[in-house]
Amino acid sequence: MELRAVADDITAHTDNAEPSLALTDDGERIVNMGYIRALDDALFRAGIIDLEAGRLVAEQAWSERPDDDAETIVNRLCLRSPALFGRNATTTGVAAPHIEPSDANAHANRAMHVAADKARTTGDRTSVLEFMRLKRRA
């Protein structure tokens, strides 16, 4: 008996509902889905790395400025959060300076030439051994 009362209550509410209001809600949902699709397309064209994060940030920007089109919102997002698009991503730590192999070789070659000149000019056994040690390393 109670089930019948609940069913009648539901039927009464659906019969009295305004169809135009339901269509408006559905229409807004369809428009929103179209706009979200446009946002997704613009995010893909911009090279988004994480679509979900980009969509959340773009939807928040859209809620703040609903008159802007998807391209404008994504362009602003590119400028505001370039890491989402893989551009200008910054690293968090300090790396040791990179020494080019040619620079390291140039230093070793320079030391070897200095030792060779010293060994040749002095003829000292220590200088000759130093030159031979450096030559073996190279």
Image: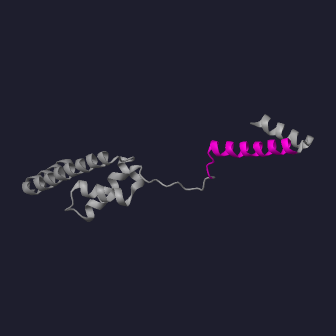
Q: Position of residue 96 (x, y in %)?
A: 63, 52
The C terminus - image quarter: top right
Q: Position of residue 8 (x, y in %)?
A: 13, 51
Work out which residue is located at the far right of the displayed protein and give it: 125
Viewer-side residue, 118 vs 109: 118
Residue at left offset 27%, top offset 49%: 42
Looking at the rendering, which quadrant does residue 133 occupy?
top right
Q: Is residue 36 left or right of residue 109?
A: left
Residue at left offset 92%, top offset 40%: 125
User: Does the segment drawn in magenta span residue 108?
Assistant: yes
What segment carries the magenta color? 97-121
Residue at left offset 29%, top offset 61%: 61
Q: Is residue 47 left or right of residue 24?
A: right
Work out which residue is located at the far top of the displayed protein and give it: 136
Q: Position of residue 123 (x, y in %)?
A: 90, 41
Work out which residue is located at the far bottom of the displayed protein and give it: 64
User: Does the segment drawn in magenta span residue 20?
Assistant: no
Residue at left offset 21%, top offset 60%: 68
Vertical arrangement, residue 62 with respect to residue 118, above or below? below
Viewer-side residue, 88 vs 102: 102
Instruction: Tally the marks.
Output: 0
Q: What secondary structure prevails in the magenta region? A: helix
